[in-house]
Image (cartoon, grey):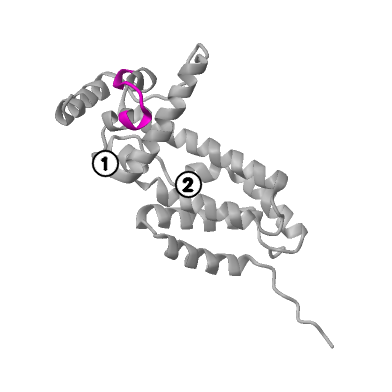
Amino acid sequence: MSRHSGCQRERQRSMTHPPSDAPRRKPLRADAQRNRARILDAAEAVFAEKGPSASTEEVAVRAGVAIGTVFRHFPTKNDLLAAIMKSLRQRLTDQGNSLIAEGDPATALFTFFALLVEQAAATRTVVDLLAQTGVEIQPDEPIQALEQAIQALLIRAQHVGAIRPEIHVAEVVALLTAACHGALRGAWDEDLRRRTLAIMFAGMHAATIPRTS
């Protein structure tokens, strides 16, 4: 199938199928679950590498499945993009909960903060594609969904004296929203993210009390 016909097929499907990532009524068989996971992983990599020019056919090739298999799981490209964002939010939630349970209280919030900003920069192509097709995903949506984890990490960090006690979760979320928006719209590279976050984290760290002789 040519690239032109593939794109035309996607446009036709987009016009006849409204974007939706609603759960299926029947649970997927084990092989179907594996295919869906492979498609999502492949799509995330393809769109990150090739941007808006990437096609569903390229996703199918990367995933090692037939194009029909992709369309059975995701009837339109919009469905596929929305599913990527949903999957990403779930992964981040799981990582946040893991840090709450097992992470170093003094550093876990900073680790999670940096991870969220990194993901915002990495998913810029997906968010832009969704916006172009009318499925706007605001950069603060995943942050709102993860606020509970952020609050728990903040409390743990303050309990061990790693973060200033007067800082509240609303302020951490405000800083995180600004950083994610900047990384998303400004396409921050790794060095700029590192330097910017270092400045933010320095302001959040508890002040060192000078020793008296």
Crowdedness near tag 2: few (<14), some (14–19) or many (≥20) residues, C-alpha within 10 Å:
some
- Disc 2 or disc 1, which is closer to the eye? 1
Q: Residue at x 66, y 47 (%)?
A: 99
Q: Which image quadrant: the N terminus?
A: top left
Pick whichever, 1 or 11, lies toward us: 1
Pick whichever, 210 or 47, lies toward us: 47
Q: Report helix, strand or loop for mark 2.
A: loop
Badge number at residue 122: none
Query: Do residues under tags 2 and 1 come within 8 Å of each other at their CB atoms?
Result: no
The amino acid on which the numbered mark 2 sits, given as a three-letter code, is Asp
Specify the quadrant of the image occupied by residue 200.
bottom right
Question: Which numbered disc, 2 or 1, marks the residue that appears first in the sequence?
Answer: 1
Q: CA distance from mark 2 to mark 1?
A: 22 Å
Badge number at residue 140: 2
Residue stretch rendered in magenta on the structure: 61-68
Q: Is residue 205 above or below residue 16?
A: below
Relative placement, left or right, of 41 versus 92 is left
Tell me if residue 7 can be seen.
yes
Coordinates of residue 41 in the picture (x, y in percent):
43, 34
Coordinates of residue 155 in the picture (x, y in percent):
72, 53
Q: Is residue 81 above or below residue 99?
A: above
The amino acid on which the numbered mark 1 sits, given as a three-letter code, is Pro
Residue bearing mark 1: 52
Q: Residue furthest bottom?
A: 213
Q: Residue furthest front?
A: 64
Relative placement, left or right, of 118 versus 107 is left
